[in-house]
Image (cartoon, grey):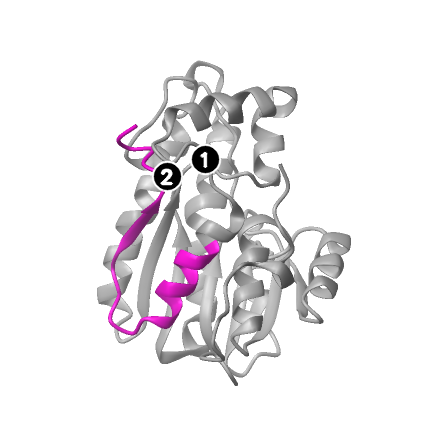
Amino acid sequence: MSSPSPRSLPIAAEPVLHGQTVVVIGGSSGIGLAVAGLARQAGAELVLVGRHAERLQAAAASLGGAGQVIADLSAADTVPGIFRGLSRIDHLVITAGTAQLLPLQDATAEALRQVLEERLVGPLLAIQAARSLLVPGGSITLTSGLLASRPIAAGAAVLAGAVAAVEAIARALALELAPLRVNAIAPGLVDTPLLDQLFGSAKAQTIEGAARSLPVARIGRAEDIARAMFALMTNPYITGETLYIDGGGRWG
């Protein structure tokens, strides 16, 4: 199941971001690329951040051009360089982060730290580095996940704890950084390249089973989450919120 390219997303975004700069960390594929596509349709100047140069180049080309920065949120020394050369940021979106399941009995201290570095420490360092460039009334959108409220048995404890902490961070930073707005999106199962990493050859079977269990009878697509992120970016009266976009996954 493939997601449409950002240019073919079935939504007509008005140019409400004309003249604004949107930085998307994790913008080379999946949800990050989809929200970058909506921001571009809305008139934004884009900076895409990712770990792989070729993927960034392909993503930027699909959007008709965008700034590109190679960085890894789990490598603290690369984070400040993400924003070098920028004079202002209107919206910061962070979608990067591992989706690896990690049974606690098999987890090394290094593996545990890796999850926390990618999901918590890296985003916090990025926000810290971007703080002086973010304009009043601008926004930060973080990424949590369905595991925060509905964990599964198969090795999800560490990741569930990390994404639940993201939601707490969003609430706290909405107060600490006001009038900047800080929100989080909590996606359910979404068909992005992360699923290949997570399920491998069992991906198709997993998707089919998950779709049967959901009230909407399908799993999510990147553009489903991108629409919600775009709404959080552009609605000036939303802050400190976590928006679950999971097809009814908490209730199904």
Of 160 and 1, nearer the camera is 1
Q: Are marks 2 and 1 in contact (CB under 8 Å)?
A: yes
Q: Residues within 10 Å of mark 2 (few under 14, many from 20)?
A: many
Percent of width and height locating residue 97 = 51, 44
Of 44 and 197, nearer the camera is 44
Quadrant for the N terminus, please: top right
Q: Label 2, on which residue? A: 247
Report helix, strand or loop for mark 1.
loop
Residue bounds of the magenta highlight: 226-252
Report helix, strand or loop for mark 2.
loop
Lower sequence index among marks 2 and 1 = 1
Q: Is residue 96 visible?
A: no
- Give the foreground label among 2 and 1: 2
Q: Residue furthest top?
A: 105
Q: Is residue 211 visible?
A: yes
Percent of width and height locating residue 173 = 28, 61
Q: Is residue 230 magenta?
A: yes
Q: Label 1, on which residue? A: 189
- Quarter of image, res 240: bottom left
Which amino acid, mark 2? Gly
Residue drawn at x 45%, y 44% is 119
Residue drawn at x 25%, y 66% is 176
Residue drawn at x 67%, y 71% is 66
Residue 4 vs 67, above or below: the answer is above
Percent of width and height locating residue 94 = 48, 56
